Image (cartoon, rainbow, N blue to C red):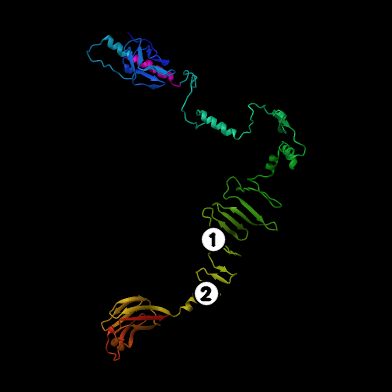
């Protein structure tokens, strides 16, 4: 027979004794039955009877479920096709009925699943009905129309409570109505209930209440309206020039640019004793701070990005002037112009008797231009100021200096040698002199023999301007 309309699940509350739990719906296989305790599906510890019976069977537990737990037996069938019909094959009623019964039982299970979903009561309704069930494990809200959680609401309420004047009592009366509390102070009666009271005449509270009235402007020299409206009518912060006859003492003064399409930032004008504008400070189109005088123009500028300070005119410092990189386009004076650093880098001061370059030139007019330490066998020990030092085939040396200057003097010193050689090495001949070169030869007593063994080591010093 065809499977009837059945509810494909049965729920029990265990008593700790019962082991057999019937189910009244049909299953084709024991694997089509899901057995769970408190929502946990079991895979063993029980047997299933009545498989294939239209009116169901029973589940027998090997051990009675604990008292109070929820035992649920539910038909859970996969949405798959298990029968395939062949061309010219047998079309038996039992096979067809079982195939359709399976489809019908799967649909019954899906109907149960659909009943568990959050849905609208019908197409005609524009809301979802929870049917009295809770919704758990949702995220905290982000957008204005998001559902919220209890923890989010509790945290928000707690945060608001921290900014609210609270009382320990669970119930407190409401404060008086507008008509009763207007222009009055909030007080509390003997029982702690809120009441409206009059401020003492002439007290600070009385004055503040009167200033806050719609006619408060009358008390500060304006004809009608509130104090705020009177001040707003007298001063426009953004679009009206403010002229004050005396000193202005303010905290947090803001100076905004003028007009609806300003090309520069805010500006403060400064007037001299003749009431003529002498200078102003402002923010230019690039956002840089400036001090501008009427006669000289920009006299100081501070770059908003780099912090560099530019002073196009002379800067006089009575004390010490410090800075991270000071650049002067002209001469820098010190000691009330007693000394200065010129634009070309020269230094002038009384300690030098004039410019430092002249002082150094006078002190270094005659200096060592070149020197060399040479061995008689042709080895150059060390040298300075010579472009080349070459030994000749006649027992002499040719010296070429790095720079050319005809006004120079040459000194030769001898170090070491054999006793006989030293007796013969009495002098050195210097010849072939040019502006940047000269030659040296070892001269003995006869002046015709040259023996460098007599000079194991000698020194040459060139002095000149």
As measured in the structure, the alpha-carbon distance from the residue carrying label 2 to the one carrying label 1 is 26 Å
Q: Which residue lies furthest to the top in this view?
A: 1
Q: Which residue is at the far left?
A: 88
Q: Quadrant of the C terminus?
A: bottom left
The residue at 55%/32% (across/down) is 156
Of residues 274 and 118, the one nearer the viewer is 118
Q: Residue at x 50, y 76 (%)?
A: 359
User: Which label is found at residue 355?
Assistant: 2
Foreground residue, 43 or 142? Answer: 43
Q: What stretch is highlighted in magenta?
A: 102-118
From the image, tell me which residue sits under label 1.
323
Query: Disc 2 on helix, strand or loop?
Result: strand
Q: Position of residue 254 (x, y in %)?
A: 62, 48
Q: Neighbour class for label 2 at 10 Å: few (<14), some, many (≥20)?
A: some
Question: Along the polypeptide, which appears first: circle 2 or circle 1?
Answer: 1
Question: Which quadrant of the figure has residue 84?
Answer: top left
Q: In this view, does 160 lie to the left or right of 141?
A: right
Q: Is residue 252 left or right of residue 223?
A: left
Residue 223 visible at all? no
**In this picture, residue 368 sits left or right of residue 95:** right
In the rendering, at what x and y percent does residue 427 appear?
A: 33, 87
* Nearer to the camera, 133 or 117: 133
Say if 56 sits above or below 416 in the image.
above
């Amino acid at each position: 027979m065809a499977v009837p309309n059945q509810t494909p699940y049965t729920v029990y509350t265990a008593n700790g004794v019962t082991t057999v739990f019937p189910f009244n719906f049909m299953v084709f296989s024991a694997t089509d039955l899901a057995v769970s305790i408190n929502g946990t599906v079991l895979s063993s510890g029980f047997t299933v009877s009545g498989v294939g019976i239209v009116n169901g069977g029973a589940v027998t537990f090997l051990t009675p479920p604990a008292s109070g737990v929820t035992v649920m037996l539910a038909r859970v069938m996969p949405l798959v096709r298990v029968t395939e019909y062949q061309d010219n094959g047998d079309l038996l009623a039992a096979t067809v009925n079982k195939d359709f019964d399976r489809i019908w039982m799967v649909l019954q299970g899906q109907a149960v699943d659909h009943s568990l979903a959050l849905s609208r009561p019908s197409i005609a309704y524009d809301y979802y009905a929870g049917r009295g069930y809770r919704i758990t494990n949702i995220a905290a809200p982000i957008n204005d129309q998001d559902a919220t959680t209890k923890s989010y609401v509790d945290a928000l309420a707690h945060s608001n409570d921290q900014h609210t004047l609270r009382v320990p009592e669970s119930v407190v009366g409401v404060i008086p109505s507008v008509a009763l509390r207007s222009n009055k102070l909030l007080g509390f009666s003997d029982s702690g209930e809120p009441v409206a009271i009059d401020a003492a005449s002439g007290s600070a509270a009385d004055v503040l209440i009167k200033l806050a009235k719609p006619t408060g402007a009358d008390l500060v020299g304006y004809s009608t309206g509130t104090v705020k409206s009177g001040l707003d009518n007298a001063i426009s912060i953004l679009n009206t020039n403010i002229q004050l006859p005396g000193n202005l003492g303010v905290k947090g003064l803001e100076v905004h640019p003028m007009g609806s399409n300003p090309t520069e930032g805010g500006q403060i004008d400064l007037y001299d004793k003749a009431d003529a504008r002498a200078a102003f400070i402002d923010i230019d189109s690039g956002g840089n701070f400036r001090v501008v005088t009427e006669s000289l123009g920009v006299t100081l500028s501070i770059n908003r990005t780099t912090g560099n300070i530019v002073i196009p005119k002379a800067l006089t410092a009575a004390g010490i002037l410090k800075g991270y990189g000071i650049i002067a386009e002209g001469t820098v004076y010190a000691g009330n112009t007693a000394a200065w650093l010129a634009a070309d880098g020269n230094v002038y001061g009384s300690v030098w008797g004039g410019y430092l370059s002249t002082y150094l030139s006078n002190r270094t007019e005659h200096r060592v231009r070149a020197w060399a330490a040479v061995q008689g066998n042709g080895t150059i020990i060390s040298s300075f100021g010579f472009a080349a030092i070459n030994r000749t085939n006649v027992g002499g040396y040719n010296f070429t200096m790095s720079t050319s200057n005809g006004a120079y003097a040459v000194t030769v010193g001898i170090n070491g040698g054999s006793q006989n050689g030293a007796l013969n090495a009495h002098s050195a001949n210097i010849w072939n002199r040019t502006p940047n070169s000269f030659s040296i030869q070892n001269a003995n007593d006869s002046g015709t023999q040259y023996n460098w063994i007599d000079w194991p080591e000698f020194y040459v010093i060139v002095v000149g301007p």
